[in-house]
Image (spheres, rainbow, N blue to C red):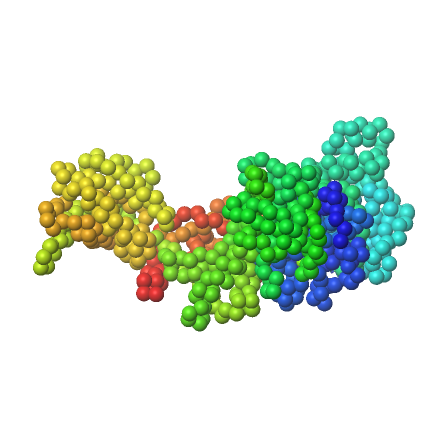
Amino acid sequence: MNIYQPRNIRNVVLLGHSGSGKTTLAETMIFESGTSSKRGSILQKNTISDYREIEKEKEKSVYSSLLHLDWRGTKINLLDTPGSPDFWGQVSDSLYVADSALVILNSEAGVEVSTEAIWKATEQKSLPSILVVNKLDSEFSDFQKTVDMAKESFGRGVAIVQFPYSEGEDFHAIIDVLKMTMYEFPEAGGRPDKLPIPESQKAQAELLQNELVEAIAENDETLLDLYFEHGKLDEYQMRDGLILGMQQREIFPLFCASAGRNAGTGRIMSFISNVSPNPLQRSMPLKSGENHTISPDDSPSFFAFKTISEPHVGDITFLKATGGELKPGDDLINMRTDNGIRLGGLFINQGSKRIEVNKVIAGDLAVALKLKDIQAGDTVAGKNSDLEFEPIQYPDTTMRVALRVKKEGEEDKLANALHQIEREDPSVEVEQSQELQQTILHGLGEEHLNVIHHLLKERFKLDVEFMTPRIPYRETITKKVEARYKHKKQSGGAGQYAEVYLSIEPWYEGMPDRNDLNVRDVQELDLEWGGKLVFQNCIVGGVIDNRFMPAILKGIMDKMAKGPMSGCRARDIRVSVYDGSMHSVDSNEAAFKTAALMAFKEGFLNANPQLMEPIYEVEVTLPADYMGDVMSDLSSRRGQILGMDSEGSIQKVKAIVPLKELDQYTTRLKSMTQGSATYSRNFHSYAPVPQDIQKRVMEDTLQVEEG
Ligand SMILES: Nc1nc2c(ncn2[C@@H]2O[C@H](COP(=O)(O)OP(=O)(O)O)[C@@H](O)[C@H]2O)c(=O)[nH]1
Ligand SMILES: [Mg+2]
């Protein structure tokens, strides 16, 4: 295996809607470069990238894959990602380490919802991006429509470098306006013949070349001057302009391909090698807020972007070398844990295969085996380094499910398996909810959760059941009440005595102070489950000793944690202790705790208690055609529309919807829109549950207490 200098390395992430042809394109590029001698296909389930059983079964990518190829002395590392939003956790890590992107558009469909969302992500990372219009051989291919949609969605920066001579069944040639050449492909695809542009296409080619030249010159004054002077730019001047324009995200060159027919990849690889940035030309974000520029002259360091584990191999760490040269035997430090890390075997990765290397130079993507206690997001560097990269941002989860093992006694095994799954896929969140008495799995959609189910079964040999998770309801009160309780017990020896008077009110931000009471001390407690308890000591004349106040608060808190009405947690209440009595011998903390708990409970139940439910703010991104269906579905879920927005042909709807109504929403949305919509959600607030629903809920939550 050759060792490549950083300037001869390109780290390219393949992005696009599911089915646009990313995996096929990667396969074709690797084959066309001669790095692999056979070209696999999705249908034959033998691509280098989609090698896992579940990917063969689904005939699509579920995990991102690290691949590489050599194109005329340049090492192109390809990060092939899944397009389905369920697996976007896999996109996050690949985006993080890539230095440029290939965004694949399916010419049958143009810009799709996922393309739109993925584009946002490239924007956030200021990632230089090349567009590839794929599937030009398809009978449904529509190049012009795809380009129009791309311009509408991504702006004027979209610059056509190539257009097809003809598309559909007859697709066989691509006209390149940068080279002013036509590439004609043999029947079986592969290396094209270079031909002059046919007379019939000349005018169109010249028009597009002018547009391209103007777009390029626009970003660079020197080029602009040259352009005005000579009326044109030569290929090398254009290349310089493109490099700059791409880095500033002013220009998004657009290429043509049929990955299926093995057409167009050679030119794309040359362009990547000539124009796309190398790892030294891009910086990586540090925790400190500064940026780090990779240099082979620094001391060795790397960023771990993914960890997986394989039977017979153990832990596999995917890394980007961020400084110097990494070599087996190097002793480094994990900056998160401060623990030492000794490098063992280092490898270049090709799907499921690894090729051992004796060093990895800064900028390259590679794999290290058997590193101890390492996870995605870790920075590993030399002893005195203060390098620490910003963590990878994963998408917010959109779906939750409760799970339990079917066989008793396998709970620990499940916990371990989930821990491992979470580590390998940080877009999964496992919550052991004390409150709901359930293990809850949060993920990015039904398909994502089903893959976890599959993993638990196949890899961890665990039979688990998925259930609808309970809702974390809250209780509160709606009116002010007074409550008192005297706790008195005389049994044999020492007795128990305590009496408290409480004033209990609904708490809200900015509520007035109690002028009618002698407020001596206020404790404002932020409850761990959200909301507040404000506790006021208003005792006059020492009728209750200060030393009993913590016990009184404890009694109230115990009841807040297990609400008087349904057992759900209570919130947003102000309690003032304003009177009571004690006994010189029989009063103690336990007695005051009990008295407070009882008084609080009684008062609470008299204060028109109200059940509250969590409300989420959701944002649905969808093609305009489905707007009506999605809106009426949202209102049937007690949703309130907050606003609408459109970007090109893509619409966005914002609404607030109770969590209770969001069970299975991802699945419903998918079926309603034929998989073309995505959605995100964030906790918004707690709101009162309507009375008719409250009754049903109470039955449910009573089961929680029993369960
Ligand atoms: N006609 C045609 N089909 C293609 C082309 N590229 C990919 N496909 C097919 O489209 C489907 C999805 O391709 P895949 O590479 O898995 O897309 P990905 O989800 O973006 O990785 C597969 O059935 C491919 O065989 C192409 O250029 N032309
Ligand atoms: Mg794929």
Residue 155 drawn above or below residue 555: above
- The residue shown at (66%, 53%) is 346
Residue at the location (48% across, 68% down)? Answer: 464
Q: Quadrant of ligand 2?
A: bottom right
Q: Is residue 656 left or right of residue 310?
A: left
Q: Is 592 displayed left or right of 48 in the figure?
A: left
Question: Could you say where residue 345 lies in the image, as x and y percent from the top left?
Answer: 65, 55
| x then y, percent, for residue 174 | 82, 51
In this view, the residue in front, 180 or 59, is 59
**Closer to the camera in the image, 55 or 551:** 551
Q: Residue furthest bottom?
A: 407
Which quadrant of the figure contains the C terminus?
bottom left
Q: Tell whether 695 sits left or right of 546.
A: right
Position of residue 699 measured from the top left corner of the image (x, y, whole percent)? 33, 63
The residue at the point 79 percent across, 38 percent down is: 239
Q: How far from the left and from the top, in percent, is residue 210?
A: 81, 38
